[in-house]
Image (spheres, rainbow, N blue to C red):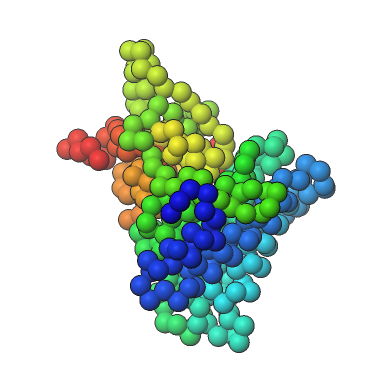
Amino acid sequence: MKKHSTLGEFIINNQSHFSGSSGELSRLLNAIRLAAKVVNHEVNKAGLVDILGAAGETNIQGEDQQKLDVYANDIFMQTLTKREIVCGIASEEEDDFVVIKGSNGNNDNKYILLMDPLDGSSNIDVNVSVGTIFSVYERITPKGQPVTKADFLQKGKKQVAAGYIVYGTSTMLVYSTGRGVHGFTLNPAIGTFYLSHPNMEFPRKGNIYSINEANYVHFPQGVKDYLKYIQKKVEEGQKYTSRYIGSLVSDFHRNMIKGGIYIYPTSSKSPKGKLRLLYECNPMAFLAEQANGMATDGYQRILDIQPTELHQRVPFFCGSRSMVSKVGELMGAYPDGADY
Ligand code: P6P
């Protein structure tokens, strides 16, 4: 596909790769495209209207709900509900999954979607990039019946699509349907996404590490050893740099382009890690592997983890293969020293 083709053209041209595709996945991706533009418009003017600040409620994570969190959740829910595409949605902003019926009240739609509608929302008030993360599966319970929790607790390797929108200096939609990772940049003047980054890949090696070192004292020893390993490399003259935006999507996006690793390990504040498996780690891990990168919980492949709860948290190590495998080695994941 030539560069600068539009996202719409790209979706249509790639539909033929799905055997028996009835166009539902294309319609799902087009719905995400539309919702992304609407949310982008609001995010870009957040400072101008009274949409900042907590909505006065807290979500299931016990975090203040910024009004934009609520707004983004509503826009994606509304856009995905009116198009006969999904039969269920799970969201960071919803305590439980939501059953989505077809217009005639049926439960015949094929896909389920999980999302973090506005990740990094604490950055909104300080004008730093935030993002939307989404993950798509085919339902596994029988068509015609309401979706159940089992449909949402599939292993990450069963995803049929995943992606993110990064609302940054420019707004990009980056996604994969299992045939590589492709980035589209929005031209806000005409509201069109153009293919700007075809076949995105993590450089095998990298020199950027993204971690909140304020939690150092509570890190597992293997993570402490990895940071010491990096510092020793710097002493030996190798170039490394620390970059941590506090927005997973932005750190991931930069590391995928330049090479690097993002780590959110366990800590006393987050004994199971902070990031959510279903709608943060699984979609980002799907993208990472499609981009020749790697994603583990420090010991095992994220995409192999059997989920047990909608909002469960896991430690997250994601990025360039050589960096993720090195920290895994120090965590004791590869006793035989295997290098991925
Ligand atoms: P901390 C945002 O809340 C988020 O889920 C990720 O986007 C980000 O990388 C991380 O948490 C930041 O967490 O504890 O370092 O502020």
For residue 197, above or below residue 323: below
Residue 223: horizontal and vertical position, in percent?
38, 31
Say which of 214 and 321 sits in front. Answer: 321
* Viewer can see residue 37: yes
Quarter of the figure with the C terminus:
top left
The count of marks equals: 0
Ligand 1 image position (quadrant) = top right
Horizontal arrangement in the rendering, residue 270 relative to residue 321 (left or right): right
Res 57 → quadrant: bottom right
In the image, what residue occupies the spot 33% across and 12% down?
236
Residue at screen point 42% across, 50% down? 181
Q: Position of residue 267 (x, y in %)?
A: 46, 37
84 displayed left or right of 141: right
Asked whether the viewer can see residue 58, the reply is no
Q: Quadrant of the N terminus?
A: bottom left
Q: Position of residue 315 (x, y in %)?
A: 42, 44
Residue 304 in the image: state x and y as whole percent.
32, 56
Q: Quadrant of residue 73?
A: bottom right
Residue extending furthest left? 336
In this picture, is 208 found above or below 234? below
At x 72%, y 39%, the residue is 125
**The furthest residue to the front:** 2
Residue 169 higher or lower than 58, as above or below: above
- The reply, left or right, for residue 127 in relation to residue 248 is right
Residue pictured at 68% horizontal, 53% vertical: 190
